[in-house]
């Protein structure tokens, strides 16, 4: 009856066949390139021709300024991403998990690896950078980072390795400068596994269990210090917030949306 689509060119096919659809946007380039860009105009058209446009960042609702656009948060599978039972913390370990780069600039530090590593160095904490091979472009452009003896790099983790990484670390670092989703998926997965977050999220969206830190190393160090000193509270709030955004809860809201437009 209704298709949920999240690729703008496929909405053209649906419209041609008179198939109603709900559109879900994930592309931060629609903001990055600006309102005169092809990618913005195509996404705006996809929203305008939809029954409803789901935007996972509140700033995108204003950016597109379309009556069909509404904020709809991402969700997380809390059955798979779970806290490690009886986890004993001897020393804190930081984790970044991301695919860096933006707009064809594969080495550009959109995700903020530099800030996370510098904050780890300031506190002499171990940090893991995990993600796809594309991240090698960042390391090629920033060779100084591999000189930090407590830096660990993980390539191409699969689903099991991904969960193990979350469970083996204690704090998630996310000093990203541009995301379409607020919160994005890695923040939700980390929180669901019991990791407090030190990083950036849009001001219009609260996320409990998170220290909202700009891309500023002294401020991130202050945030990490507060998280470490109040770790139990941050961890509890992170898990509770992730549970509120479980797949089940998001599906209930999505079902209500389908009923409202059917």
Image (tube, rainbow, N blue to C red):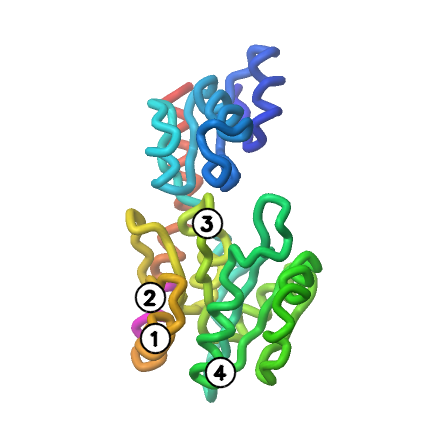
The residue singled out by tag 3 in the image is 178
Gap between marks 1 and 2 measured at Cα: 7 Å
The residue singled out by tag 1 in the image is 227
The residue singled out by tag 2 in the image is 211
Quarter of the image for residue 151 reads bottom right
Point out the image quarter for the C terminus: top left
Q: Please tell me which of labels 2 and 4 falls first in the chain.
A: 4
Gap between marks 3 and 4 measured at Cα: 26 Å
Query: Which residue is located at x 51 percent, y 75 percent?
Result: 169
The residue singled out by tag 4 in the image is 125
Q: Residue 258 placed where, x, y %? A: 42, 26
- The residues colored magenta run 231-238
The nearer-to-camera label among 3 and 4 is 3
Gap between marks 4 and 1 measured at Cα: 14 Å
Q: Please tell me which of labels 1 and 2 falls first in the chain.
A: 2
Gap between marks 2 and 4 measured at Cα: 18 Å
Structural crowding at the residue carrying mark 1, measured as other residues with C-alpha within 10 Å and reported as few (<14), some (14–19) or many (≥20): many
State how many labels appear.
4
Query: Does 97 sit above or below residue 218?
Result: above
Marks 1/2 in contact by CB < 8 Å: the verdict is yes
Gap between marks 2 and 3 measured at Cα: 17 Å
Q: Residue 199 placed where, x, y %? A: 40, 63
């Amino acid at each position: 009856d209704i298709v949920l689509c999240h690729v703008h060119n496929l909405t053209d096919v649906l419209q041609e066949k008179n198939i109603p659809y709900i559109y879900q946007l994930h592309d931060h380039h629609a903001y990055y390139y600006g309102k005169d860009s092809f990618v913005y105009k195509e996404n705006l058209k996809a929203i305008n021709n939809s029954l409803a446009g789901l935007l996972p960042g509140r700033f995108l609702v204003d950016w597109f300024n379309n009556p069909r656009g509404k904020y709809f948060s991402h969700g997380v599978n809390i059955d798979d991403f779970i806290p490690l039972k009886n986890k004993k913390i001897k020393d804190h370990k930081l984790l970044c998990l991301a695919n860096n780069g933006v707009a064809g600039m594969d080495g550009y530090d959109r995700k903020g690896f530099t800030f996370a590593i510098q904050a780890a160095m300031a506190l002499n904490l171990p940090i893991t950078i995990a993600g796809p091979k594309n991240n090698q472009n960042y390391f090629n452009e920033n060779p100084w980072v591999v000189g930090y003896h407590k830096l660990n790099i993980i390539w191409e983790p699969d689903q099991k390795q991904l969960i193990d990484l979350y469970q083996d670390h204690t704090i998630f670092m996310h000093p990203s400068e541009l995301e379409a989703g607020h919160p994005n998926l890695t923040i939700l997965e980390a929180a669901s596994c019991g990791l407090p977050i030190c990083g950036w999220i849009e001001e219009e969206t609260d996320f409990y269990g998170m220290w909202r830190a700009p891309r500023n190393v002294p401020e991130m160090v202050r945030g990490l210090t507060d998280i470490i000193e109040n770790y139990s509270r941050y961890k509890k709030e992170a898990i509770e917030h992730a549970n509120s955004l479980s797949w089940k809860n998001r599906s209930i809201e999505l079902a209500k949306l389908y009923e409202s437009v059917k």
